[in-house]
Amino acid sequence: MNKTEVKSPLAAQPAPQRRSARWSHSTGEKVLAVALLLPAASVILLVVGYPIVYSIYLSSFEKILTQPKPTPPFVGLQNYINVIKDPLVLESTLLSFRYVFISTAVSFLIGFALALLLNRPLKGRALIRSLFLITWLIPSTVTATVSRLLFSPQFGGINLVLNQLGIINRMLDWYTSPDLALPAVMAVNIWRSFPYMMVMLLAGLQTVPDELYDAAKVDGAGWLGRLRYVTLPSMRGIIAIVTLVSIIWNFQQFTTIYIPTKGGPSTATTTLAVNLYKTAFYAFDHGKAAAMGTLWLVFLLVFSALYLRAVGGRNRT
Amino acid sequence: MKKAFASALVVIMLATLLAACGATAEPETIIQTVEVEKEVEKIVTVEVEKEAPEEPIVIRFANWGGTEEFTAALFQEFIDGFEAQNPNVTVESVAIPYPDYIPQLTTQIAAGQAPDVMQSYVLYSPPIQGMGGLGALDDYFTQEELDDIMEWQSGIYPDGKLYAISWSPGVAVMHYNKEVLDEAGCAPVTELSEDWALFEECMGKVAGLGEDMYGQIIMGDKDPTNYFWDFWFQYGWDCQIWDEEGNVVINSPECVDWGEWMKKAYDNRWISQGVGGSEVRNTFANGHGGFFLDGPWGPGVATVLSGRDFWEWGGVMAWPVFPNGKRLNPTSTHQLMMASQSEHPEVAAAFIKYLLSPEVQLAYYEGTGMMPISRSIWATHDTLQGDAQQQVLTSSSAEFVKNPAMGARWMMTSDFIMGGLQEIWDGADIQETLDRVAANVETVGQ
């Protein structure tokens, strides 16, 4: 056989044509991918991107609804300067940090404890899990309205129970006492949000391989040791995500604060979200409110990136 | 195959998107109309005027009445009645819950989607007028029609135009629980309403009945609309927010006196602590207070909440004469407004006139207790003279005063003052607190 006559089927194809076929195939897939993503991307651009861009644009104008002008004056960074100089903004930001971190930490601890409990063989586990989920499924408006009744100084159930248990000896004005209002709105928020933590952490717990626990037991690790050296490291990623989501949600939390207290008494529960709402809909200063929202967005983006790097990053390595 | 499929998909999606963006009803008709209007404007105008009643017209009516159990059916009856008289007109009810009314309405107006007609109350018209959202009503009413409306708080603004017309006086009077007052050993209400010291003494006696008892139930939470129900006390001490020149004077010595009295009243449970809009009526109706300031709907609501006819256990009286010798009667006038953006101002005005007609005003009164605003109705319906609240008003020769926080951004002003009051109740230094409130109010403007 003459070797020179033997031709590989691939060798018969000119090289440029092969590249073209691959390119064409790859391009087709890309076009398909873009086409499939287009509707969702369009919706996201419209309902998320446009408001963000418009809000940033609005923040550089003096736009007070009750003082209409044919062309709102361009003020550059003045709204941002007003926001930074406003003592109430600083006060409400610090209050938001307290609200967010205490709410997140406590709901995490409760959610994690319940997840550990429900991860064990337990009679009626599904029923208990469903019951806990109810508070998370109820709309926050309903929760807030119900909480207003529960914490009522005259006929609220909380006072009644605490009084019967001998913990208090007089009816407390939960939502009108500057010392009690913030703990009360935080308690409602924790009550509402811990089921989310519980469900997500329970899902995470169920992904930890039993072999790791078995090995830890062989090594002599007790319950606490297994929690510290097996459970927590295995769940670092899920913990990072659920706490981050919870932090962002809690920063945005408005309904469970505004409905029962309107940010009062005085400014005891005026978080950044409530302050922003009042700036936009009490004072009708949409330019300043947009500047507050933009600064807040930037802060949350930076915080999220740093947080994921600090908490979730080591998990990837 | 995949390439062809992908290309087809992209074309279909783009076509769908473009079609969705450009969708308009019968574009040819619109173009044609514009051309005709340009060429034979006068003739077409006459034709439109002749044919206008036949054209289907839709107007939107913003209201909170449609969201409330007591008034929803009544408001629908009003709409049905107008539609029956005007078969070519459809009135779409834009029912907005009362607490969300201003934010939702201002957002709709800012977005160019203003409802044609809006139910309002005296504090709601300033922000909407301030943002240019209201159309003047002067041209749609004759002087005779305007003269028939009682001189309650009208919506006449600095440019001299009428932007909101009163629909009902919405008078608030002091409701009392006679069983509680009897138990406390208070003087007869006729004496209480003439003597502030006796009134204070009675509030103290009621508070002495138990730790869950209050002399007077007031709204003490931070809802800005609740300030309407609390600020009347300020007048008793001549405490104003602004002086005649427009300077902020909420930190004046008179206001410090008012703050001291409010603190004393709070500490002694002469006034209630920590009750918001949703609880005040329950608290009063369940026998936890001697007095309660409420609107004309008060007796009806108290009857429902207590399960007993209000007039068996309660009554209404004039606001007592304050230490400064003044007697006040708060009003919470309900109004009707027309949007400046309305494409059918004539129809919107016609609907407002219909809502001001005797049959609607009387139906509103019978259904809710909201008193009619037209003099002619009062003149021709003797039964109205027997109304308990009306009797209180006419017999007490009260001084009617406007809410001081009537600027376009009154909600922010209210928020600052209620916040300051809550700090005072909590024990903060009164002068310092009012100084800070004054500085904040200054930033908002009158």
Image (tube, coloured by chain):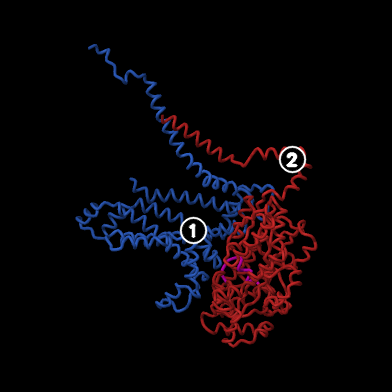
Chain colours: A blue, B red
Residue B400, placed above or below residue B347: below
Give the amino acid type for the residue marked by disc 1 in the picture.
Gln
The subunit carrying tag 2 is B
Left/right placement of residue B122 relative to residue B221 reads right
Determine whether, in the image, residue A114 is placed left or right of residue A296: left
Count all numbered tags in the image, as a single digit. Answer: 2
Going by the image, does B51 lie left or right of A58?
A: right
Across and down, in percent, residue A219 comes to 20, 55
Q: Position of residue B213 (x, y in %)?
A: 54, 80
Secondary structure beneath label 2:
helix
Residue at image x 60%, y 62%? B66
Q: Is B178 colored magenta in this rendering?
A: no
- SS type, badge 1: loop
Name the residue located 47 percent from the left edge and 32 percent from the top edge: B8
- Magenta-highlighted residues: B220-231
Name the residue: 55% across, 84% down: B208
Q: For this view, does A46 lie left or right of residue A67? A: left
- Residue B226, magenta (yes or no): yes
Chain of the residue where label 1 is placed in the rendered structure = A
Q: Quadrant of residue B95?
A: bottom right
x%, y% of residue B287? 55, 80
Near mark 2 (Cα within 10 A), the count class, few <14, some 14-19 or many ≥20, is few
Does the image show residue B264? no
In the rendered image, the quadrant that contains the C terminus of chain B is bottom right
Residue B37 circle label: 2
Q: In the displayed image of the protein, which residue is found farthest to the top?
A: A2
Dot 1 corresponds to which residue? A253
Which of these two is toward me, A226 or B331?
B331
Mark 1: few, some, or many residues within 10 Å (few <14, many ≥20)?
many
